[in-house]
Amino acid sequence: MKEEYLPRINISKTEFIESGYVRSNKRWQANTLYKYVKSKKIKPFKYPLACFDLTIQLKYMNRLNCIEFCEECKRVFDCDINIPIILDDTGQVADGYHRIFKSLILNKKYIMAYRLDSMPSPDEIIKEE
């Protein structure tokens, strides 16, 4: 069979605009967090990857089917590790897990990070069901 007749599975690309951070009942778009960093003129620093807690349970990962897992792998593959991650006001990763994962895979020693000392207003308050 000729190769052009073989079926192809398309793995969708997730856009930055879809990224967000949820803490308790609040949700922030990644774009909101980066605008906040710029407005506060926060300077990035070298965040040692050895400080990253590798025991963190990514709750959504154990619910992924094969195509969703491939999409997550593609996000890691496609991300730009030159863009600093964002740590929230408690030191938790608010944006940048895929960049951290890629940096770990590439055996980097650190990644650039912004650390917030306060949080901007959330984009959404999640109502409890």
Image (spheres, grey):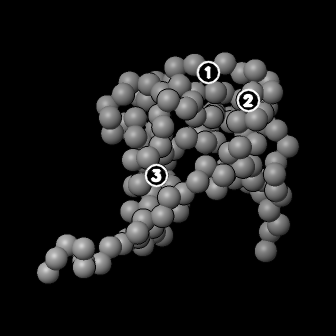
Considering only vertical position in the picture, is 109 above or below 67?
above
Q: Are marks 2 and 3 in contact (CB under 8 Å)?
A: no
Q: Earlier in the sequence, mark 1 or mark 3?
A: 1
Q: Count residues near mark 2 (Cα–Cα under 10 Å), then give few for <14, some for 14-19, many for 20+.
A: some
Mark 1 or mark 3, whichever is nearer to me? 3
Label 3, on which residue? 75
Q: Which mark is residue 31?
A: none
Pick whichever, 62 or 43, lies toward us: 43
Report x, y in % for residue 87: 63, 34
Report x, y in % for residue 97: 51, 44
| Gap between marks 1 and 2 measured at Cα | 9 Å
Count of number-bearing discs: 3
Q: Is residue 5 visible?
A: yes
In the picture, residue 38 is in which quadrant? top right
Q: Are marks 1 and 2 in contact (CB under 8 Å)?
A: no
Q: Earlier in the sequence, mark 2 or mark 3?
A: 2
| Gap between marks 2 and 3 measured at Cα | 23 Å
Q: Secondary structure at mark 1?
A: loop
Q: Which mark is residue 44?
A: 1
Horizontal side of 112 relative to 4 (left or right) equals right
Q: At 74% from the left edge and 49% from the top edge, which residue is drawn? A: 28
Amino acid tagged 1: Pro
Amino acid tagged 3: Arg
Q: Count residues near mark 3 (Cα–Cα under 10 Å), then give few for <14, some for 14-19, many for 20+.
A: some
Q: Secondary structure at mark 3?
A: helix
Label 2, on which residue? 37
